[in-house]
Image (tube, grey):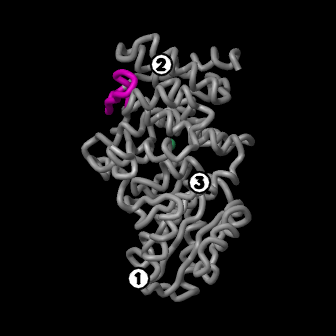
Amino acid sequence: VKNISILPTSVFFGEEAYQQLHIFYHKRYLSNIFILVDSNTREHCLPYLHGRVTFLRKAKIVEVPYGEKEKNIQNCIKIWKEFEKQNSDRKSLLINLGGGVVSDMGGFSASVFKRGISFLNIPTTLLSMVDASIGGKTGIDFNGIKNEIGLFKEAELVLIDLNYLKTLGKRELKSGMAEIFKYGLVADSSFWKEINILSNNLIGRSFIERSIFLKTRMVRIDPKEKFGSRKILNFGHTIGHAIETFFIDRHSPISHGEAIAFGIICESWISWKINCLTEKQYDEISKNISNTYPIKEIDQKTTETLLSFMRNDKKNEVGKICFSLLRTIGDCYYDKKVGDVIIQESLEQLKKFIKNN
Ligand SMILES: [Zn+2]
């Protein structure tokens, strides 16, 4: 099977993406076009987009500051005010040019403005190409909780141009790799093997296409996370999100991918301890992930805070912390309740990777 035939119909790469954008523009009789950028993508990506697509030079630019901390209601209000100022209507279009923060917040803002205007995603980070811009989750953080407010709404088009990856630093590229590792672990053991052989070259188109394919396959079965199968995408994220939330308010915030790397190691350890994964598989996973990401020590006090974040996670039933765990490499199940003690132990065992780094 050729990869291209199994991509969702809204996702396009390279030259074909720009052709689709032109078709969209000519078919829709748009009243006005907005491009949502952050301070980084305005500087590094917008000039390139303007160079590629001349009709976008007259689009209204809406800029928000860079960073996960900015995924908040204040910036949505800023976006809505811009929409109002230009007398936007249902024929308006928002193009999200950026990473996950821009596409999550832009998708949400567009979806609720006048009960919904169209939006497109042009992901500029590896993370948003393989994850955030695909699958229809939009939203913002609220009251210290990640993605607390939001809705399911797919972008009408997702346009992937690998040239944007050249604007990224190494740390940002690595952030996206964590999700690629995750796709292999939860759904495709041969993909996991290939990733580990080629881990310095993950940014090729075929890796991105395979990741999108694997994600889309799970999302299609369970688009709104109602039945459960979409939950396997949360592997690494129960602990990972808590760690990400914790560090957002510190002086050294860590990237989503770094947080998920912690989560993958801890949740693989839990998978081993409750007799699913073998020790050998756990060793293989933790070695590969800790070689790619810096691991920080989590002290006892921090562990308590992380547990309280996990209890607040909307993926849980009241009072119980639920995990998606590996049955083996390439197979994952979900809704497994895990006690506090084993979660604490999984965080403690991170220590051994700090010495290795
Ligand atoms: Zn993620």
Q: Nearer the viewer, mark 3 or mark 2?
A: 3
Q: Nearer the viewer, residue 57 or 262?
A: 57
In the displayed structure image, the side of residue 264 where residue 228 appears, left or right: left
Disc 3 marks which residue? 162
Asked whether, in this view, residue 349 is left or right of residue 120, the answer is right
Mark 3 to mark 1 CA distance (whole Å): 26 Å
Q: Position of residue 240 (x, y in %)?
A: 53, 35
Q: Are marks 3 and 1 in contact (CB under 8 Å)?
A: no
Identified at 43% across, 36% down, the residue is 183
For label 3, the SS is: helix
Do the residues bearing badges 1 and 2 touch, measured as CB atoms within 8 Å?
no
**Picture layout, residue 96 above or below residue 145:** below
> Is residue 39 toward the left or the right of residue 10 in the image?
right
Disc 2, SS: helix
Location of the C terminus by quadrant is top right
Is residue 248 depicted above or below 91 in this figure?
Answer: above
**Which segment did they paint magenta?**
324-337
Q: Secondary structure at mark 1?
A: helix
Name the residue rendered at 53%, 54% in the picture: 141
Tell me which label, 3 or 2, sits earlier in the chain.
3
- Return the mark for residue 28: 1
Q: Quadrant of residue 316?
A: top left
Q: Which labelled disc corresponds to residue 177? A: none
Residue position marked by numbered label 2 in the rendering:
269
First along the sequence among labels 3 and 1? 1
Image coords of residue 346 (percent x, y): 51, 20
Q: Residue at x 64, y 30 (%)?
A: 293
Inspect the magenta stretch and tell me whether residue 221 lies in it.
no
Mark 3: which amino acid? Leu
